[in-house]
Image (cartoon, helix red, strand yellow):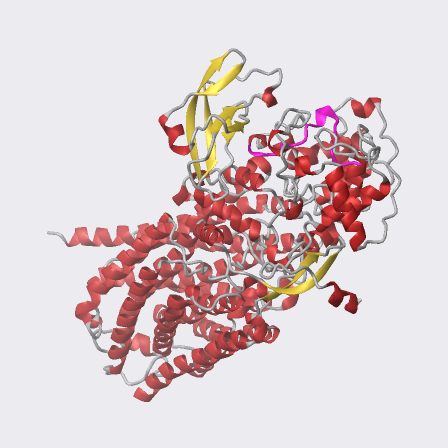
């Protein structure tokens, strides 16, 4: 009878060993499962997007630290990290996951449950600010969210306010000294909300002290009184900065896939959106659930999350809109608004809303138009007729570079397009909020990443910002050349060799 | 007949270390009161994210692993090990080998568990679902399990009753398999990067349920069902088929946790096929259990242990059928990331295995404390709360899983699909509370009974 004991124990070992081999070792021997390459969408010098195979790279030290926080706080219990090739996930989240994307993941974080959205494509969907606001209180940005708050990932300082007439300044406390260098020549503008909560942007490495002097700006209060005796400064701690670095990295190995993501491509519809009361009511409901957190219940851009966000959320009461196809100073068309909502504003807290039913998107446009009298008194001027792009060539790009110099784009956007021109630091928008010129090399274009999008922006300008219309000062050809040049600044280069895309090889394929 | 009737025949209580068994069960009761309840707290956060919010160690991400690991290694395993100390000596006709280490193992096991849970609350997490405990905790767990394995194997080797009853096969298999699996847990989260790490994790997590909890549960029911009914086992041959088909198919199913991930398709298919084949062991053991109940259905009313065992078996039938078809690709599409899966894990882990462990405890506790439950009505109330709770929870979770899954397949906006879950989550929390209250009442009636008996003994 002892043999049965031995048999049972032996069977235990044998079957498990067999299974571990067949289901553990063998799949791991499949070369594809250990591949480091993924298909990556890259922008070419010519402004279009192509796919290539390219190896993924390991996480940076900061991203590793962020990943550790992601594991520790159990983010992965509610957020999966894989896009399945079924159930319409490709249209919802983005490209289907490939093995190479996980090459550096240890342990894996695929997860088995989605209580929140999948995160494998979340990188660059939102700006960093949005993530900070969302971790401080998820319901600031997403009123219906059921994610926990993570206040312990922030440093919070309560600082008394001193008043001198209209101005309010922070009292220099010991705590403040500990976290800031307090250099008077480097003011750090803070925009407290009515409750006295003021977000402080962290250093990019998340360390302390932050260089500069925190300075209260009461621009957002306009005529209202700022009446608190102390403000609560909220600074993302090092761990949270690391976490956000990690989040922004997710999906980045697939390159600029978002620029060719079918779900958020829209051709602005010509038809106007019905402005009946029913549509507006539906729009109000959508707005309250999806938009009010940032743009505010009254549409004035002072939502609960606004103190965290830069650029500030759009103030709809002014009726001034950046992204239009209509001439400078005009209201946008419904199609313009529809496009902005659908594709989001890259690099800011405004995400893409392609998942939202199109009827909801239309309804919310009808509602947004109730915030400003302009919509009653004026009509959008006719859109600029679509211009025909020239054939792209090296000469065109060179011409674009010349125009970039002569039209003084570099004054704001910098000599190399990094958004670091001589006047970049001082820029303010029409609402007196600081505004940064776009860094073209990052390839995150607010109004769209095709040369045609950039051409449109140069033609009609971004209303309410220091970006003017160049319709009169530059010819169509010059603007086209400039548009192609600007887009080519974020063209893909091999991070290791610095080589640009092999045009010859591509030409051969075509 | 002599083999099948074994558990009833051997009744030499002098072989038992009653104090040790009582302590294992008492610790099991403590964990039973704590860890399932943590689940209800976690569930409440779905509807009220601010409930106990803003405090790191009370946050969802920290409490969830405490619930999962606590139920597996605390509530279920501690009760099981206690029951094994009752079952093995009786089936073998000898005392436990290495009995002098018993108390030390008891304390190490439970303090290690408590320390591990505190570490989880403080943010330790190895990133493998159901394997989050810190490395040190896993090492100690493995150490205790190895010692118990040695104890049980030696006891079985020294047995005076030659036939090896089916409970003992499963016991040997459970311990041997889990020793191997914990080695996998020691290494897994920090070795083999990439998508293969997910494949290995799939294997690990299903070895926890398939090669520890399942055979451990079989140990319990194969012993206590005939014992509590005073009826012979229906078929010894069926239990053979059940054992070997489980041993053959269960080790292969793990990757079904990551279907449609970029893991090799053939490996996914093997996992799906083995998952379907699990119907064989499941239906054979179920047939065996209901065959054993045979003509005794009418006696179940006042037979609390048997009632729990039969209910657990019904849950097992439902849960495992669901589990098998859940692995099919066609059902994966809507349900993969939804509460459908959570429904499966609750009806099996709690509805079946914890319920079987409760049955064992209800059977053993009065016998080793020379008492009877304080109130049958209270115990029966507990039974119905638990049964109604888990049944309703299963229905709710499965429904909401299908609902959300098909909403998403239909292209619903993400947040809308989450929003639609809110009423269901409410009910789910209530069903969890019903189970928790049921557990508490059961423990209360057992404890009051034994405390009363002890008081009566005092001069």
In front of the other: A278 or A155: A155
Q: Is residue A268 visible?
A: no
Q: Is residue A321 magenta?
A: yes
Question: Residue B315 lies in magenta, yes or no?
Answer: no
Would you say A44 lies left or right of B397 here?
right
Q: Identify which residue, A253 or B8, lies in the foreground.
A: A253
Q: Position of residue B106 (x, y in %)?
A: 24, 62
The chief SS type of the magenta part is loop
Identify which residue, B396 or B296, lies in the foreground: B396
A470 lies above or below B44: above
How many numbered discs sit on the rendered protein?
A: 0
Residue A283 location (% of width, % of height): 73, 34
Left/right of residue A62 with respect to residue A56 in the rendered view? left
Instruction: Give residue B20's quadrant in the image.
Output: bottom left
Q: Left of B236 or right of it: where is B323?
A: right
User: Residue pushed farthest left?
Assistant: B459
The residue lying at 75 percent from left, 38 percent from top is: A406
Bounds of the magenta span?
A308-324
> Which x, y percent locates residue A147?
53, 43
Q: Nearer the viewer, residue A138 or A399?
A: A399
Q: Quadrant of the N terminus of chain B?
A: bottom left
Q: Residue at x 37, y 73 (%)?
A: B180
* Residue occupying image coordinates x 26% and y 75%: B150
Q: Residue at x 54, y 13 (%)?
A: A166
Residue A178 appears in which quarter of the rendering?
top left
Q: Is residue A76 visible?
A: yes
Give percent across and percent down for residue A177: 39, 29
């Amino acid at each position: 009878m002892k043999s049965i004991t031995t048999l049972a124990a032996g069977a235990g070992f044998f079957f498990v060993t067999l299974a571990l081999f067949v289901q553990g070792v063998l799949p791991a021997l499949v070369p594809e499962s250990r591949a480091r390459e993924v298909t990556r969408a890259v922008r070419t010098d010519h402004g279009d997007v192509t796919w290539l195979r390219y190896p993924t790279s390991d996480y940076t030290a900061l991203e590793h630290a962020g990943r550790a926080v992601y594991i520790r706080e159990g983010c992965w219990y509610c957020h999966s990290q894989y896009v399945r090739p079924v159930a319409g996930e490709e249209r919802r989240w983005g490209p289907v996951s490939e093995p190479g994307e996980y090459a550096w993941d240890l342990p894996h974080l695929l997860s088995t449950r989605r209580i929140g959205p999948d995160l494998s494509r979340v990188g660059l969907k939102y700006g960093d600010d949005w993530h900070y606001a969302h971790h401080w209180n998820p319901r600031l940005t997403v009123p219906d969210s059921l994610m926990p708050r993570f206040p312990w990932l922030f440093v919070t300082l309560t600082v008394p306010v001193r008043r001198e007439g209209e101005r309010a300044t922070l009292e220099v406390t010991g705590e403040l000294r500990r976290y800031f260098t307090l250099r008077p020549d480097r003011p750090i503008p803070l925009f407290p909300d009515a409750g006295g909560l003021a977000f402080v942007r962290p250093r990019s490495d998340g360390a302390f002290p932050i260089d500069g002097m925190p300075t209260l700006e009461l621009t957002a209060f306009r005529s209202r009184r700022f009446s608190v005796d102390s403000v609560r400064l909220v600074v993302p701690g090092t761990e949270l900065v690391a976490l956000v670095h990690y989040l922004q990295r997710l999906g980045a190995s697939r390159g600029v896939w978002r620029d060719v993501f079918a779900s958020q491509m829209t051709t602005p519809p010509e038809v106007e959106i019905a402005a009946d009361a029913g549509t507006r009511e539906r729009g109000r409901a959508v707005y309250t659930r999806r938009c009010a957190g940032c743009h505010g219940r009254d549409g004035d851009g002072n939502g609960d999350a606004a103190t965290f966000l830069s650029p500030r959320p759009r103030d709809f009461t002014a009726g001034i809109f950046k992204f239009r196809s209509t001439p400078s100073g005009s209201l946008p068309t419904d199609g313009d608004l529809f496009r902005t909502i659908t594709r989001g504003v890259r690099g800011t807290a405004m995400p893409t809303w392609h998942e939202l039913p199109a009827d909801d998107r239309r309804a919310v446009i009808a509602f947004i138009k109730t915030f400003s009298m302009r919509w009653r008194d004026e009509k959008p001027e006719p859109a600029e007729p679509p211009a025909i792009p020239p054939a792209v060539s090296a000469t065109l790009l060179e011409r674009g570079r010349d125009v970039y110099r002569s039209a003084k784009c570099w004054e704001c956007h910098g000599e190399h397009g990094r958004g670091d021109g001589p006047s970049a630091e001082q820029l303010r928008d029409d609402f007196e909020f600081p505004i940064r010129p776009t860094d073209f090399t990052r390839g995150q274009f607010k109004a769209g990443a095709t040369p045609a999008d950039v051409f449109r922006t140069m033609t009609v300008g971004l209303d309410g910002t220091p970006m003017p219309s160049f319709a009169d000062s530059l010819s169509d050809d010059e603007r086209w050349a400039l548009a192609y040049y600007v887009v080519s600044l974020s063209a893909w280069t091999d991070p290791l060799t610095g080589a640009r895309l092999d045009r010859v090889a591509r030409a051969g394929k075509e | 007949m002599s083999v099948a009737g074994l558990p009833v025949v051997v009744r030499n209580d002098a072989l038992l270390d009653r104090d040790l068994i009582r302590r294992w069960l008492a610790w099991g009761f403590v964990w039973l009161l704590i860890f399932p309840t943590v689940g209800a707290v976690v569930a409440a956060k779905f509807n009220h994210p601010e409930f106990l919010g803003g405090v790191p160690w009370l946050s969802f991400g920290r409490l969830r692993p405490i619930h999962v690991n606590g139920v597996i290694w605390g509530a279920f395993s501690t009760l099981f090990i206690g029951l094994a100390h009752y079952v093995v000596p009786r089936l073998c006709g000898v005392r436990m080998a290495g009995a002098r280490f018993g108390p030390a193992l008891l304390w190490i096991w439970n303090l290690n568990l408590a320390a591990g849970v505190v570490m989880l609350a403080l943010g330790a997490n190895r990133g493998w679902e159901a394997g989050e405990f810190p490395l040190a905790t896993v090492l100690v767990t493995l150490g205790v399990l190895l010692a118990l394995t040695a104890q049980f194997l030696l006891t079985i080797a020294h047995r005076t009753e030659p036939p090896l009853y089916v409970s003992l096969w499963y016991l040997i298999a459970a311990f041997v398999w889990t020793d191997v699996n914990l080695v996998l847990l020691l290494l897994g989260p920090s070795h083999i990067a990439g998508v293969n790490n997910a494949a290995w994790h799939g294997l690990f997590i299903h070895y926890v349920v398939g090669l520890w909890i399942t055979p451990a549960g079989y140990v319990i029911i194969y012993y206590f069902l005939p014992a509590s009914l005073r009826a012979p086992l229906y078929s010894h041959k069926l239990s053979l088929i059940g054992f070997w088909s489980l041993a053959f198919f269960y080790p292969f199913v793990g990757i079904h946790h990551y279907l449609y991930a970029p893991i090799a398709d053939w490996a996914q298919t093997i996992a799906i096929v083995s998952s379907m084949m699990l119907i064989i062991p499941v239906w054979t053991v179920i047939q065996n259990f209901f065959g054993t109940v045979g003509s005794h259905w009418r006696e179940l009313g006042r037979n609390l242990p048997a009632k729990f065992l039969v209910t657990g078996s019904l849950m097992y039938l439902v849960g495992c059928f669901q589990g098998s078809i859940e692995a099919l690709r066609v059902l994966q599409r809507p349900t993969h990331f939804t509460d459908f899966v959570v429904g499966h894990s609750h009806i099996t882990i709690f509805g079946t295995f914890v319920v079987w462990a409760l049955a064992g405890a209800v059977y053993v506790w009065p016998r080793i404390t020379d008492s009877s439950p304080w109130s049958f009505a209270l115990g029966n109330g507990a039974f119905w709360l638990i049964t109604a709770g888990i049944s309703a929870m299963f229905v709710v979770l499965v429904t909401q899983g299908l609902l959300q899954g098909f909403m998403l397949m239909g292209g619903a906006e993400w947040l809308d699909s989450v929003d639609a879950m809110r009423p269901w989550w409410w009910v789910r929390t209530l069903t969890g509370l019903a189970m928790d209250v049921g557990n508490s009442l059961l423990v209360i009636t057992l404890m009051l009974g034994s405390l009363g008996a002890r008081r009566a003994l005092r001069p």
